Image: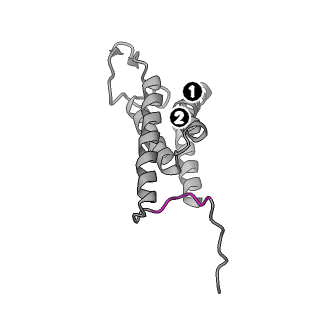
Amino acid sequence: MRLAVVVTGVAAAGVAIAVNQVVGLLYIAYDIGVFVLLPAMVCAIYVPFSNSWGCLVAVVAGIFLKLTAGEYYAGLPALIKYPFYSDEWDAQFFPYRTMYSIVLTVCIIVVSWITGKLFRKKYKVQPCEVKDKQAEPKEE
């Protein structure tokens, strides 16, 4: 958990340094919040078998897809040029954010279903949830 806080803080500082406008920071935060985290929240509420492995894979995939689509405010060029890409405007006119939301929702459902099956079959994969388990005291 501490590592995640440090990594998030370093990433946030890097984005804040790279972006020259406050509007750019708001735009990037909106993109990450809506198009990366919203599918995880919706699946956590409405998909009964969703788990944190599916959400983790989807968030990592969402950030990767967001970075490869390019970001004007951060100065990132588009690595993936979707249909309707304009070289003149250097912009994506394809609704890639909507596509990302759908892809990430499907990713959460598929990965959660697969890992749920693995956990029920008693394979060596350990879930990262600690629901329904009581913490055992450490013996010294």
* Image spot of residue 107 (x, y percent): 42, 39
* Relative to 114, residue 63 above or below: above
Magenta region, main secondary structure: loop
> Mark 2 falls on what kind of element?
helix
Mark 2 / mark 1, whichever is N-terminal? 1
* Image spot of residue 95 (x, y percent): 43, 19
Amino acid type at mark 2: Pro
The residue lying toward the viewer, choosing from 78 and 130, is: 130
* Image spot of residue 16 (x, y percent): 57, 38
**Across the whole image, how many numbered discs are drawn on residues?**
2
User: Badge 1: few (under 14), some or many (20 or more) residues near its Cα, within 10 Å?
Assistant: some
> Mark 1 falls on what kind of element?
helix
Query: For mark 2, what is the residue?
Result: 39
Residue depicted at 64% across the width and 79% down the height = 138
- 131 to the left or right of 56: right
Residue depicted at 52% across the width and 45% down the height = 50
* Relative to 86, residue 130 above or below: below
Res 19 seen here: yes
- 48 to the left or right of 94: right
Residue 102, label in figure: none
Residue depicted at 59% across the width and 38% down the height = 41
Res 75 seen here: no
Residue 99, magenta (yes or no): no
Amino acid type at mark 1: Tyr
The residue lying toward the viewer, choosing from 42 and 95, is: 42
The image quadrant that residue 104 belongs to is top left
Residue depicted at 53% across the width and 39% down the height = 15
Residue 27, label in figure: 1
* Image spot of residue 73 (x, y percent): 50, 27
Q: Which residues are magenta?
A: 126-131
Q: Which residue is the extreme one toward the bottom? A: 140
